[in-house]
Amino acid sequence: MRYRANHVHEPGTIKDIFDGSHFQSLLNTIVPAGEANPFFYFSDERDIALGLSTDGFAPFKKCNKTCWPIILFNYNLPPEICFQKKYCIHVATVLGPKKPWDWDSFCWPLVQELIQLELGVKAFDAISQALFLLHAYLILAFGDIPAMALIMRMKGKNGIRPCQIRNIKGVHFNSHTNYVPL
């Protein structure tokens, strides 16, 4: 669990997620949820960096049913083990005949727990034999294009207006496909 705290960033070199610009910018950012007692992201070496992944798959030979596992990865573990099955945190599986219509309704309990972890929860440090406030931050969400469209509330890869936030319009190519010029 000390991998993140012991990682040495070499400017201009990306060897790990902690060398990326997103993580580096978080180090100098005050956590918005901590307005009463301001603190910075990853100000304690025991703070945890998490990544979320989801993807739909058909668990049976016939592809008429799907399920969507929601998995958290602990980036405080070394890269050679953080994606091993025994270290992955299976949060939930969304079952259904098709993909979830309202992703937010399934993720609401997870979001509430992640907000609480961002604010901090009391934990015991076995090394120092003391209680401390443990913070965990979701720094990355990833998946294939349909999964990211679901997470980001996009209409999907073939939608005429695929994104609810940006005013992007797809170009109609044939009777079944719309392409989004980027």
Image: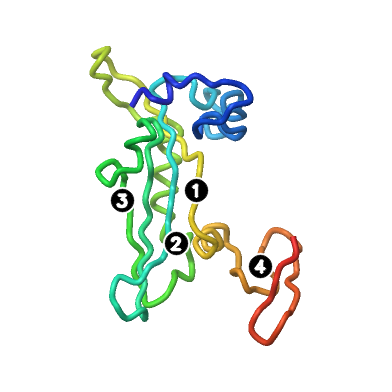
Looking at the rendered structure, the secondary structure element under dot 3 is strand
Three-letter amino acid code at disc 1? Ala
Looking at the rendered structure, the secondary structure element under dot 2 is helix
Residue to which mark 4 is pinned: 162
**Mark 2 or 3, closer to the camera:** 3
Question: Residue 147: x, y in percent?
Answer: 49, 61
Residue to which mark 3 is pinned: 90
Residue found 57% across the figure and 25% down from its top:
27
Residue found 50% across the figure and 43% down from its top:
140
N-terminal of the pair, mark 4 or mark 2, is 2
Residue to which mark 2 is pinned: 105
Three-letter amino acid code at disc 2? Ser
Q: Which residue is nearer to you in this view: 49 or 101?
A: 49
Q: Which residue is nearer to you in this view: 159 or 3?
A: 3
Residue 126, quarter of the rendered image? top left
Q: Distance of mark 2 from mark 1, alpha carbons?
A: 17 Å
Residue found 58% across the figure and 33% down from its top:
20
**Mark 2 or 1, closer to the camera:** 1
N-terminal of the pair, mark 4 or mark 1, is 1
Q: Residue furthest top?
A: 128
